[in-house]
Amino acid sequence: MSRQVTQCPVCDEPLRITELSCTACNTRLGGLFQAPPLARVAPEHQSFIETFVLCRGVIRDVEKVLGISYPTVRARLDAAVTALEAVYETGGAASSASTADTAAAARRRQELLRQVETGQLDPAQAVEALRRL
């Protein structure tokens, strides 16, 4: 999947679409256009959603394609859903603070699951930590 630039490389704020053009007749439209909801979630969520859809939602297949365990697939799916819900709830681009909070929580969930997979953390402890997020 090609990377979509959605954040300013200087200040990390969301970028706005201000022009659309036709590749056939070169007509140009100027204005303020909103990116589709999927384009407004983090690239890692976009990539996971793409894989999930290509696997027709079969978690077993997602596990094989990504080489990760069932709990990790579930955690990534939950994180992607949460991020997409945040986009729909805000009705626009999520603020950088809420996006950062969502991304931080997703990273924490992934880290907890990795610790369970490697035996560094007991599953019951991970569940408790996940509830506190």
Image (spheres, rainbow, N blue to C red):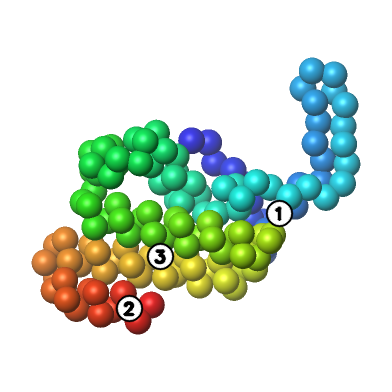
Whole-angstrom CA distance, mark 2 to mark 1, is: 33 Å
Instruction: Find residue 104 and report its image quarter.
Output: bottom left
Residue pictured at 87% horizontal, 36% vertical: 29
Q: Nearer the viewer, mark 3 or mark 2?
A: 2
Tag 1, which secondary structure? loop
Helix, strand or loop status at disc 3: helix
Q: Position of residue 15 (x, y in %)?
A: 71, 54
How far across and how far down the image is residue 109, in percent?
Answer: 33, 67
Could you tell whether 128 is left or right of 5 in the image? left
Rate crowding at label 1 as few (under 14), some (14 to 19) or many (20 or more) other CA atoms within 10 Å.
some
Res. 9 visible in picture? no
Q: Which residue is mark 1?
A: 15
Q: Residue at coordinates 50% horizontally, 72% vertically from top-left?
A: 101
Reading the image, the residue beneath label 2 is 131
Q: Is residue 103 left or right of residue 93?
A: left
- The tag on residue 106 is 3
First of labels 1, 3 by sequence position: 1
Marks 3 and 2 in Cβ contact (< 8 Å): no
